[in-house]
């Protein structure tokens, strides 16, 4: 619910829950039943026939984990080799010249965006990987339980500040992901190779942190379609899924 480390601290205190192994409930859970023929003081609980465990799953964390785990699929491969970076530098210089010409000819030049348009095939591969990750985990749980998937709804007013901070961090990760290529003017070949390796590693980390970026809603839409196709029940809660 946006409170950092809250669940871990509550579980450690044993105040509201405990860790369990769902395999222990593979054969169902027994509900306590009371005989309707006995008077209230004489009623004794009896275990009824076992029923399959039922679980409500908030998959938001799985979706974000999948998007960040497969974020490098959306990477522009030109960032990963010298020739590609050279072509990117040429494009950057061309855009800068066009912006300069536009600013010279126009009193209010339009600001161009550095955000790269991701090819459809690349986005499809990324979305498919993310959905397969979530669906596979749900199917593992379906072996021992009836699953209901729950999605977050509208942001509670009390959480507006937290959501705005998260949006700011996502924009920053997108900025780092699509940042211009840095020129390397060192005359030392070994130093150039080290700088290039570090730049590639930094760029891949930026792609993973950015995750789906502006395509997060698209991933969720495709996930809903796949849940319908797999006949896995789901609902969208009015506000926070774990709170509702």
Image (cartoon, grey):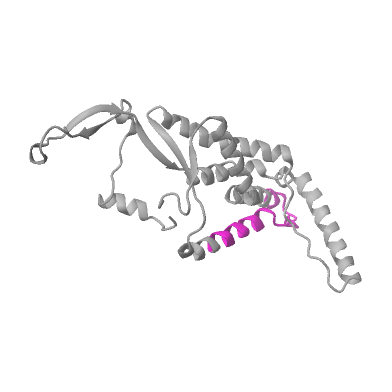
Q: Position of residue 60 (x, y in %)?
A: 50, 46
Q: At which x and y percent is residue 153? A: 51, 52
Q: Residue at x 31, y 30 (%)?
A: 25
Left or right of residue 131, residue 24 in this image: left
Range of magenta residues: 165-193
How many badges with numbers are in the image? Answer: 0
Magenta region, mostly helix, strand or loop?
Answer: helix
Q: Nearer the viewer, residue 99 or 61?
A: 61
Nearer to me, 23 or 114: 23
Instruction: Tell me if 156 is positioned left or right of 182 in this view.
Output: left
Look at the image and tell me in which quarter the N terminus lies: bottom left
Residue farthest toward the bottom in the current orientation of the protein: 107
Of residues 72 and 145, the one nearer the viewer is: 145
Q: Is residue 15 left or right of residue 128?
A: left
From what the image shows, is residue 160 above or below residue 117? below
Percent position of residue 45, x then y: 15, 34
Q: Residue at x 41, y 41 (%)?
A: 56
Residue at the image point whose x is 64% and y is 50% from the top: 203
Q: Residue furthest left?
A: 42
Q: Quadrant of residue 9?
A: bottom left
Give residue 180's quadrant in the image: bottom right
Residue 103 lies, with reference to residue 243, above or below; the image says: below
Magenta includes 175?
yes
Q: Is residue 196 a member of the stretch shown in magenta?
A: no
Q: x, y (%) of residue 72?
A: 63, 43
Which residue lies at the image location 82% right of the left edge and 53% below the top edge?
Answer: 91
């Amino acid at each position: 619910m946006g409170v950092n480390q809250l669940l871990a601290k509550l579980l450690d205190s044993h105040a509201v829950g405990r860790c369990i192994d769902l395999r222990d409930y593979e054969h169902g859970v027994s509900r306590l039943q009371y005989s309707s023929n006995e008077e209230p003081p004489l009623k004794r609980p009896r275990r009824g026939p076992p029923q399959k465990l039922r679980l409500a799953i908030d998959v938001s964390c799985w979706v974000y984990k999948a998007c960040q785990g497969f974020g490098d699929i959306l990477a522009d491969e030109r960032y990963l080799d010298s020739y590609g970076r050279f072509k990117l530098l040429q494009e950057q210089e061309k855009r800068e010249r066009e912006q300069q010409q536009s600013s010279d000819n126009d009193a209010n030049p339009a600001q161009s965006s550095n955000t790269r348009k991701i090819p459809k095939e690349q986005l499809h591969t990324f979305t498919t990987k993310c959905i397969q990750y979530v669906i596979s985990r749900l199917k593992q749980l379906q072996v021992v339980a009836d699953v209901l998937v729950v999605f977050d709804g509208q942001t509670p007013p009390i959480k507006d500040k937290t959501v705005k901070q998260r949006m700011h961090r996502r924009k920053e990760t997108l900025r780092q992901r699509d940042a211009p290529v840095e020129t390397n003017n060192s005359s030392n070949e070994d130093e150039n190779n080290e700088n290039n390796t570090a730049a590639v590693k930094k760029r891949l980390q930026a792609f993973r942190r950015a995750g789906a970026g502006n395509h997060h809603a698209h991933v969720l839409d495709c996930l809903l379609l796949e849940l319908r196709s797999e006949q896995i029940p789901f609902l969208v809660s009015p506000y926070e899924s774990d709170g509702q």
